[in-house]
Image (cartoon, rainbow, N blue to C red):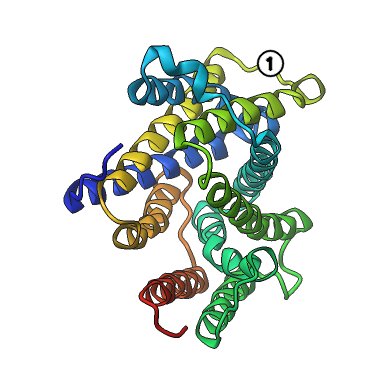
């Protein structure tokens, strides 16, 4: 898909995508009281498939469909799907035990871990600026944890696990990001997306015989809605990235924090503490500064 260079279109699609992903989180959080999170993951993957197939059909001629799945890097796709499943597991589990705003802030740590993983995996030399930004981001994580009472004995073991798992989401998402970067060097984006959807649906289906809870009609409708919302959000996100430069749109991804505060208050009556707001601000500031240093590096200057 050609880059349209339409900033207004890109921003609108990005804001809409973030809103839909957060709305999906609200439905997941509500369902998690009745449906095991692996089952939620299956429906999220399976019912996003029609949207993914629609994207592939839009971008690929019918006679070329067999070539979309052709790959010489099946192992890379499997590994990418594994990290994707782990990231989704961490996201869905932490949604079930943490307030929406706190969970959203902690799962927005992917840029921090991408920077750290680039050292051993890509052999990058990370300068003092980006290391300082990573430390600032981890300070934000600690601030949120302190606000939740993680170090004062005021937090249940389940919630403590939730904090840790939410942060681990950033680790697995960072791994996924790096794998996609690697795969995109030889694979078409449609090939990556289609293999991801097929494999993640298959992997999440493996757990169903062990955890299956038959949903009522109302919950079944919500489960299908989770997949459709997630798929629609992915389409909007794809269109946003195709409309403007990544560096211009990246700051708008943090609108998910604002949506999380609003939806959390409306749906669950959650009001984030000042600790959460401060911690989220530190994480956002650190991530934006890392993005700034990436742009500086791209310009050939020192980090």
Please state which of residues 140 and 204 is positioned toward the viewer in this rendering: 204
Q: Is residue 11 above or below residue 143?
A: above
**Residue 268, position as x, y percentages in the image:** 48, 46
Residue nearer the viewer, 151 or 138 = 138
Q: Residue at x 29, y 56 (%)?
A: 245
Q: Position of residue 158 (x, y in %)?
A: 75, 53
Using residue 288 as the reference point, say whether residue 41 is left or right of it: right
Residue 207 sits above or below residue 140 on the image: above
Task: Tell me if mark 1 has few (under 14), some (14-19) or many (20+) residues whose alpha carbon lies within 10 angstroms of its own.
Answer: few
- For the residue pair 172 and 76, the one nearer the viewer reads as 76
Q: How many marks?
A: 1
> Looking at the image, is 79 positioned above or below residue 209?
below
* Percent of width and height locating residue 69: 55, 24
Tell me the SS state at disc 1.
loop
Q: Which residue is at a point 55% across and 13% down the rendered structure image? A: 217
Q: Residue furthest right?
A: 210
Apparent side of residue 193 relative to residue 91 in the rendered image (left or right): left
Front-lying residue, 221 or 201: 201
Q: Is residue 42 visible?
A: no
The residue shown at (53%, 35%) is 192
Q: Which residue is mark 1?
A: 214
Please state if 196 lies on the left or on the right of 26 as rendered.
Answer: right
Q: Quadrant of the N terminus?
A: top left
């Amino acid at each position: 898909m050609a880059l349209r260079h339409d900033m207004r279109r890109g921003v609108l699609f990005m804001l809409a995508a973030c809103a839909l992903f957060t709305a999906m989180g609200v439905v997941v959080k509500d369902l998690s009281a009745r449906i095991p999170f692996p089952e939620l993951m299956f429906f999220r993957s399976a019912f996003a498939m029609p949207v993914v197939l629609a994207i592939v059909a839009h971008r690929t001629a019918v006679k070329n469909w067999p070539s979309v799945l052709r790959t010489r890097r099946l192992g890379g796709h499997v590994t990418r799907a594994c990290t994707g499943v782990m990231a989704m597991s961490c996201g869905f589990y932490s949604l079930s035990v943490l307030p929406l705003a706190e969970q959203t802030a902690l799962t927005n740590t992917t840029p921090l871990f991408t920077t750290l993983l680039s050292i051993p995996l890509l052999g990058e030399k990370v300068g003092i600026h980006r290391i300082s930004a990573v430390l600032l981001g981890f300070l934000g994580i600690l601030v949120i944890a302190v606000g939740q009472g993680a170090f004062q004995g005021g937090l249940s073991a389940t919630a403590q696990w939730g904090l840790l798992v939410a942060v681990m989401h950033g680790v697995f998402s960072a791994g996924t990001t790096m794998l996609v970067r690697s795969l995109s060097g030889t694979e078409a984006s449609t090939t990556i997306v289609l293999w991801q959807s097929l494999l993640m649906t298959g992997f999440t289906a493996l757990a169903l015989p062990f955890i299956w809870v038959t949903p009522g009609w109302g919950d079944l409708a919500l489960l299908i809605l989770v997949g459709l919302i997630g798929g629609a959000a992915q389409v909007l996100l794809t269109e946003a990235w195709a409309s403007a430069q990544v560096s211009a749109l990246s700051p708008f991804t943090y609108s998910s924090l604002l949506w999380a505060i609003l939806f959390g208050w409306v749906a669950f009556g959650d009001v984030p503490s000042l600790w959460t707001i401060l911690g989220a601000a530190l994480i956002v500031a650190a991530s934006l500064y890392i993005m700034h240093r990436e742009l500086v590096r791209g310009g050939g200057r020192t980090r």
